[in-house]
């Protein structure tokens, strides 16, 4: 019997060792964090954008975020992950894991399953491309948008993710981007502005119309705020002290951004807009994202408040000066604030929070230069890759912009044959008149 007991223990030893390497607490937290980030795109961002658009195009606006999540998820599992994390090349990660082939179900990434890491990173790809839609609503063809999403994840998002997080071009430079200030927000904001300029202005810009639902935007902002805890705290990939700190600073920065925006409205003696407060919260969340694993709560207060001010300035002054039609301010809230957040990380990174990071205020002025270089590289590549991708997409789909008649009638009725507000006088209950996809 003793021989059989020893044999049984020997046979079980590999499984026991593998199980001992899996951290159950970290795995449980990352399952929750991944779900929180996923919630941000088809629910949070879709409602946030949908509430700000015109009534006659609210379904199209919501649908652009919703379907972008579907397409980007498939693109990520097919080829996005392997390009971003499939190896240590300078420019690309390689193609060994196309369609996740070669990844064993029990393979680990640190203390969590590798497949869970793949899923978590895929939620980032989905929300990045969905953010872009805010710049181009009410004038882009659905087929063009879907094909653009499919290509852009592989051509633009995955390479930048590889450069920053996957061992590529910027990984060895010392850039600090804990949860996606450059990879997600600057990248999406720059891409959105590029598409807005390429498509041109809407015939009647949003400022002439009331938002479809302030309540919807507030709910969307709240869901984004909620999901952002998975976004930032989850980026530690562990349930530990740094993750806890990331949760706290995320909450502080969001609140500070919302109040900063509200106070500026107050000082300027304009309406104390709830949409403005919600936008300030999002700005605070964007600004703290790259710094969330490196700064204290007190520093987060400053980063959040300043992010609210940067977002306000970009939305109400920069856009007016340069006269571009960034419909829902994807560049103002994500691009401009993403740049600020990346640079602020170079100032405020505190080695007492994370020993792997130190900024200018803690004896490392060179970190600011590293952050500037990373911002410049991501900005230039995102604009170029987005422009080329959209040109190719428009050629393949026969044009990127809807007809003038569809734009005047509204995307919901004229393009989709559905209505978000059937009682709204600005819509016309008619079937689609043409066969554009």
Image (cartoon, rainbow, N blue to C red):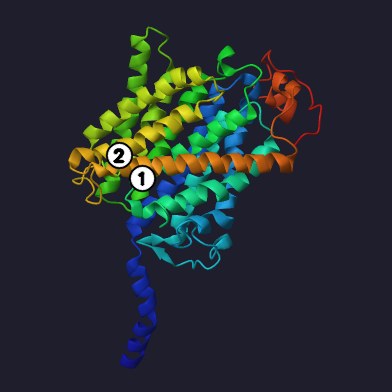
Which circle's residue, 1 or 2, is located before the other in the chain?
Answer: 1
Q: Residue 251: x and y, percent?
A: 32, 34
On-image quarter of the N terminus? bottom left
Q: Residue 331: x and y, percent?
A: 48, 30
Crowd tier of the residue under label 2, counting other residues whose Cα lies within 10 Å: few below 14, some 14–19, many 20 or above: many
Dot 1 and dot 2 residues touching (CB under 8 Å): yes
Q: Is residue 11 above or below residue 297?
A: below
Q: Is residue 390 above or below residue 12?
A: above
Label 2 sits on residue: 345
On-image quarter of the C terminus? top right
Q: Is residue 297 visible?
A: yes
Residue at (52% x, 57% y) in the render: 83
Distance between mark 1 and mark 2 Cα atoms: 8 Å
Q: Is residue 162 above or below residue 252?
A: below
Q: Residue 431: x and y, percent?
A: 79, 26
Q: Is residue 1 above or below residue 359?
A: below
Q: Residue 115: x and y, percent?
A: 47, 59
Residue 177: assigned label: 1
């Amino acid at each position: 019997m003793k021989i059989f007991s020893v044999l049984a223990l020997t046979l079980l030893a590999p499984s026991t060792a593998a199980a001992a390497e899996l951290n159950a607490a970290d795995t449980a937290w990352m399952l929750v964090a991944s779900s929180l980030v996923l919630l941000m795109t088809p629910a949070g961002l879709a409602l946030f954008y949908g509430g700000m658009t015109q009534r006659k195009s609210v379904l199209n606006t919501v649908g652009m975020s919703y379907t972008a999540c579907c397409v980007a998820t498939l693109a990520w599992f097919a080829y996005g992950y392997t390009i971003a994390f499939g190896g240590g090349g300078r420019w690309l990660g390689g193609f060994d894991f196309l369609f996740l082939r070669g990844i064993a179900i029990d393979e680990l990434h640190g203390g969590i399953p590798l497949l869970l890491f793949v899923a978590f990173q895929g939620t980032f790809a989905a929300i990045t491309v969905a953010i872009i839609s805010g710049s181009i609503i009410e004038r882009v063809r659905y087929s063009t948008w879907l094909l653009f999403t499919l290509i852009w994840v592989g051509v633009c998002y995955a390479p930048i993710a590889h450069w920053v997080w996957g061992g590529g071009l910027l990984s060895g430079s010392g850039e600090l981007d804990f949860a996606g200030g450059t990879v997600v927000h600057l990248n999406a904001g720059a891409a959105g502005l590029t598409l807005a300029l390429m498509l041109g202005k809407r015939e009647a810009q949003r400022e002439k119309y009331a938002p479809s639902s302030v309540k919807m935007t507030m709910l969307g902002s709240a869901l984004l705020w909620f999901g952002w805890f998975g976004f930032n705290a989850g980026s530690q990939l562990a349930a530990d002290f740094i993750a806890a700190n990331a949760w706290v600073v995320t909450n502080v920065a969001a609140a500070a951004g919302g109040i900063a925006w509200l106070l500026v409205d107050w000082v300027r003696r304009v309406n104390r807009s709830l949409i403005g407060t919600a936008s300030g919260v999002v700005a605070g969340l964007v600004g703290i994202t790259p710094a969330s694993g490196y700064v204290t709560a007190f520093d987060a207060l400053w980063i959040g408040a300043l992010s609210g001010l940067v977002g306000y300035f970009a939305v109400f002054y920069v856009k007016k000066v340069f006269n571009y039609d960034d419909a829902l301010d994807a560049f103002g809230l994500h691009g401009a604030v993403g740049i600020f957040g990346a640079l602020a990380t170079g100032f405020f990174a505190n080695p007492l929070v994370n020993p792997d990071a130190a900024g200018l205020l803690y004896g490392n002025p060179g970190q600011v230069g590293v952050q500037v270089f990373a911002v410049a590289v991501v900005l230039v590549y995102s604009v170029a890759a987005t422009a080329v991708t959209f040109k190719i997409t428009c050629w393949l789909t026969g044009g990127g912009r809807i007809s003038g008649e569809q734009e005047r009638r509204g995307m919901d009725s004229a393009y989709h044959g559905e209505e978000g507000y059937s009682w709204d006088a600005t819509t016309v209950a008619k079937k689609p008149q043409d066969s554009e996809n």
